[in-house]
Amino acid sequence: MVRDSEDVAVLVAGRMADVIRQALTAQGRCVLGLATGSTPIGIYRELIRRHQAGELDFSRVVTFNLDEYYPMAPDNPQSYRRYMWENFFEHINIRPDKVHIPDGGAPRERLALACADYERSIAEHGGIDFQILGIGRTGHIGFNEPGSPADSRTRLVTLDTITRRDAAGDFFGEDNVPREALTMGVATIMQAREMALIATGEHKAAIVRRAVEGPVSPDVAATFLQQHPNTACYLDLAAAAELTRIATPWVLQPVEWTPAMRERAVVWLAAETGKAILKLAARDYADHHLSPLLATYGTAGPINGEVFNRLREKIRGRARLPARKRVLVFSPHPDDDVISMGGILRKLWENENAIVVAYMTSGNIAVFDHDVRRSLDFVERAATTLALDAARVRTVRETIEHDLGRKAPGEADPPTVQELKRMIRESEAVSALESLGLPGGVARFLNLPFYRTGEVRKRPVGDEDVAIVRRILEEVQPDLVFVAGDLSDPHGTHRLCKGAVERALEGVRAPRPEVWLYRGAWQEWSITEADVLVPLSQDELRTKILAIFKHESQKDVAPFPGGHDEREFWQRVEARNQETAAQADRLGLPEYCAMEAYVIQR
């Protein structure tokens, strides 16, 4: 377990490099089992880096991919064959005839034979030396959905509803996700000599715990890995968060009782007993594996008081928030600012801070085509009123309608449509800021190049992206910077944007601004993780929600909501902000309607 996904990628790539070298020395070739999705991207980038640095030779490497959607043409933007070539194979010196990926274009009547041939080819190459595995929310490895038997082999499977829902963003809608897929079976996977199960992000924490600590069962295919003699789990801290050794380590072994550990333990104990912190008794500590903590204080009162005071100090109303400072807010997409920190934004403006909100990407791929059509209809209707050439407007509209009609699901938009979708998101962002009471002029649209692919998959953050971020930092010279720390973004944009800000900050001359991390779109900081809790009144929460409503293209059904939460973003915000306040209330802290939570990066 390591702190973040980048460290996971480096660790796994390092182990793969060792296996490749050892296998080439011992047997003249190395056979790798590969996976797709967002999880392995960093691994492939690190392997490419090592190859281009002359550290790795792939000319005698053979690969077998876990799975492929069915039916799926090899050149389809969503095909795993195309994914592998774009993200890995075309950047290394692997021989094309040594690449094996299940054939999503095979005729249905030949599928059984094609699957048998895939198994035979793995065996003829001596089996897989190292297998990469991700894990889905159903606990699937490959596409071995709940109910997959331990003796299953490469075959055609029906995809679980949850799996299809999680893939909806890649296909621009759940209806476009194939209902079937080809996958290596559990038995095929288990024959690999070494395996790496990789998971990153908070949304994987629950299924990771089930896979690692739960009973072995066909209901969760990943649990079969417990029976493999050489499997390692590579997790970031977020994905490991619900494992007993991380969530409640004092249950398993002695721990160092740092202030943070004491806080976590006491808050956990309060939840377990249903008591407010100041009402916890010595018996509560003794009955819940916390006698060592009790022994360091002698009685419960001093522990309770210390933790209660620490938590109370985190609560900062408007009077305790920064005033008359320069504040720079980085928002990965054009709605993350109001979703995650709409409450504090308004308070900071009321405190006479000079605020700039920098929207890092256009967010244009998250706009439906019907929003473009609606906007074009408005322009055509308003052409005469606006003294526009009505015939020219009509011609342009017809051309765009024609292009949209020919576009396949998931295919990149024409450049004109991409620009129109960018403008829709920008106008919504300005409207949302104004609804909070901020002038639209505080908005800056960076439109970072890494995002401008027109597709779900993005390029790595490059020097040009970092330079743009650094320029806004140098222009604003902020005392306080807000950055998205919500790293469960289904397509990694938040993670990439955070990395760009961190790289840019490295070149900032002293004094370095204070950095606050926010969440909200997918998760919220817990009370023990947070350094600052900002209370919101009922009116303030309502104003925040109305600001989110201004992002009309993301309302009702957003293109990329994140498959692990079906609620609209405003519903998530309302529930999470209210639950944070309710948890504080249960702990005996002052009662509020809602709270936003922030971590101060140190």
Image: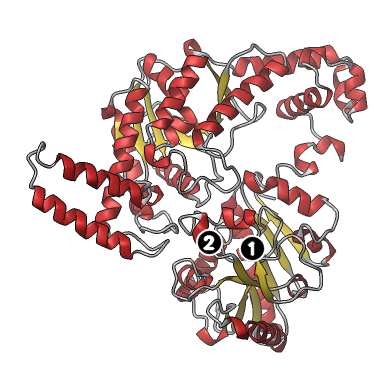
Secondary structure under tag 2 reads loop
User: Above or below — where is 163 with respect to 383?
Assistant: below
Q: Are marks 1 and 2 in contact (CB under 8 Å)?
A: yes
What separation in Å lies between label 1 and label 2 (alpha carbons)?
Answer: 10 Å
Residue sitting at the far bottom: 124
Whichever of callouts 1 and 2 sits on the residue coming sooner in the sequence is: 1
| Mark 1 nearby-residue class (10 Å; few <14, some 14–19, many ≥20) | many
Task: Tell me the amino acid under the disc marked 2.
Answer: Val
Q: Position of residue 235 (x, y in %)?
A: 67, 52
Using the image, tell me which numbered label, if any, was put on residue 159.
1
Residue annotated with mark 2: 177
Horizontal side, residue 337 vs residue 35: left or right: left
Q: Is residue 602 above or below residue 400?
A: above
- Residue 99 sits above or below residue 135 on the image: below
| Rendering coords of residue 51 (x, y %) | 51, 72
Q: Is residue 512 visible from the viewing direction of this image? A: no
| Residue 524 relative to residue 353: left or right | right
